[in-house]
Amino acid sequence: MRIPVRLTLVVVLILAAAPPLLAQGRCVPSDTIAKCYDRYLAPAFVQKAKEQQKEELNHEPAGIDTGGFNLATNKKNLIPLLAFSGLLGNSTDEKTRTITFDLNFLLPILGPQGARNAQLQAVVATEPEISPLVKNALPAADRDDLVGQLEDRLGDLSDYSIVFTYNHASRFYGRGFAQYAKRFDALTSPITKKFFPSSGSAPIDDLIEKFPDAFPEDAEDAVFEKLPAEIADEALARVEADAMSIAAFEKDATQALGAAGLARFHQLLDNQPQINVTANKRFRDSLIGPEELSLKVTYEWTSMNFNRSMSRDCHRDLDGDQPAGDIAECLQQYTAFVTKNQDAIARGNRFSFTGEYVDIDEDTIDPGLDGVAPVFLDSATRLTLIAGWSRDFFFGGEPVAMDLVAEYRDFSDDLLRQDRGVASLTFTRQFNGVAVPFGIVYATRGEYLPEVDSRLSAHIGLRYNLFGRDSKRNP
Amino acid sequence: MSRIKIWNKVPDRSTLHVRVEGGTGTAQGILTVSDDTARDLNDEALRTGTTIQLRAARKYRLLLALKFAKSSTMTVKARIEKPGGEQHGKLFEEPVAGTPGEVKAVEIKAFMLKAEES
């Protein structure tokens, strides 16, 4: 059997050109074709990727957000939070004593393809409590007994809310990758294409084509030493050459994407502006309190975001089904922006603003007990404004997140509450997936700080990310 | 499993089905047929699933580049269906992990039987 001289020369040249890769372990005659590829491509890289994910988690700064979601940092993407709760179907919150039911699946309304950004939920209080106004109106001597009687009159749906949440997703708003996939692909494809191995045959192909009966149907299972003696050595050398050319392609293309700033693409997406709107209608038995309607809007913004990395024309041109315009020029803009702003992209200033307006109905609370007068409540409104500023920095070589949040609550006509202002400064440090926040809180009224009477308090805590990085993935 | 799949002695008029699922990133591919023609496959085609008609006495080489925007795992699924509907050889399903900006390759090949053998 004669092996063509030209192909042998190609194999020899490839092997000679890749000495660094050979250090990872040469293929041996007892290998299958697949095992030979694995020596150059698979196990080390998968392990490296897992280690990198863990490392990224440990260095991911945490912090406080103003919108009220119970997750750290305003670097989060709000849409997966909707998706996450949507997948649960219903959930019980021990702290607030509520059960949440998702009344429908996420709706891809008013957003681009792939952005499922709306949700309707019902939140039911499992242990509704009698209003303090009613309790205070009861005779002190029999209060506990009478409260128990009134609570027995409450039904299962004495206190529930219908909540609609919408996260605006468009070409320039939102943090889900699906919205930006076309632009990522348009920027990366020309680079990757340059490094594809020659589009013709790989060195092993001609051998399989010429000697098909020597290989099984699933040819990657072929063991070199079990191939016919006259082609065994040649097959091993050619597979090894092919594996090395693929490994070289991966290395070169990865380096090129890194040099173009595309390894930081996800950081730019984490900095994209996002708007979240929540409307909440709360239905309550009069004994618990009046009905409420609230509207909350949260806006998050970071200066070094993907929108700013290219011109608007580039964003539009690269976002089509077929990328148009001057892709090279757009890539140049993107790379220049990332190169110039590397530190600011990773640790820049992030701002969050939240406004909430609550309209409380007028109500007459009549407990229906002898000797207890009805309580009349006027309608009331409540306005809450919250502003947050976050920035990451390194302290002793370790990442620390700083969050400054200022909050003002205006309780017009609300008999139960008075206006107040609260400011908090929190530093959060990550230790192996555990976030340790240290904070200082100042309030205009000391009684609103938890468990203290003074206006200034300090606290330290622990927070653990049970769900890992994947909890933030795109739906 | 491995990031290489080679189907040998594939009957004429079989179909190759390829699909990329999951992960945060995009995929692109180049399909070469018998060294003569090359065809680009974009992310949309690979995500929705692409079907390639295979003809006798040819060889097909599909090289996929998985480009990761964030640390995640993409899964490449491929199979060959014979003209009668049954599967040729084994199913290919390979999860590939990557980190931001990383490119990972998956190579899929099909060597066809000659027409008189099919």
Image: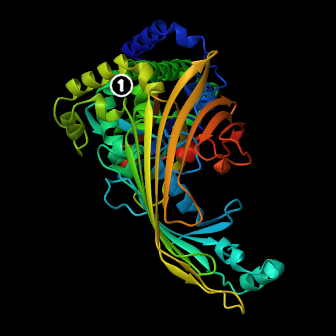
Above or below A147: residue B107:
above
Residue nearer the viewer, B40 or A393? A393
Q: Amino acid at mark 1?
A: Phe
Above or below B66: residue A356:
below
- In the rendered view, does A75 fall on the left or right side of A157? left
The image shows residue A130 at horizontal and vertical percentages of 68, 76
- In the rendered view, does A396 fall on the left or right side of A388? right
Q: Is residue A194 visible?
A: no
Q: Is residue A87 visible?
A: yes
Q: Secondary structure at mark 1?
A: loop
Residue nearer the viewer, A196 or A62? A62
What is the residue that sits farthest to the left in this orientation? Answer: A325
Q: Residue at x 30, y 37 (%)?
A: A183
Q: Residue at x 38, y 49 (%)?
A: A275
The image shows residue B98 at horizontal and vertical percentages of 52, 32
Above or below A105: residue A221:
above
Task: Quickly name the residue at label 1.
Answer: A196
Q: Residue at x 63, y 76 (%)?
A: A288
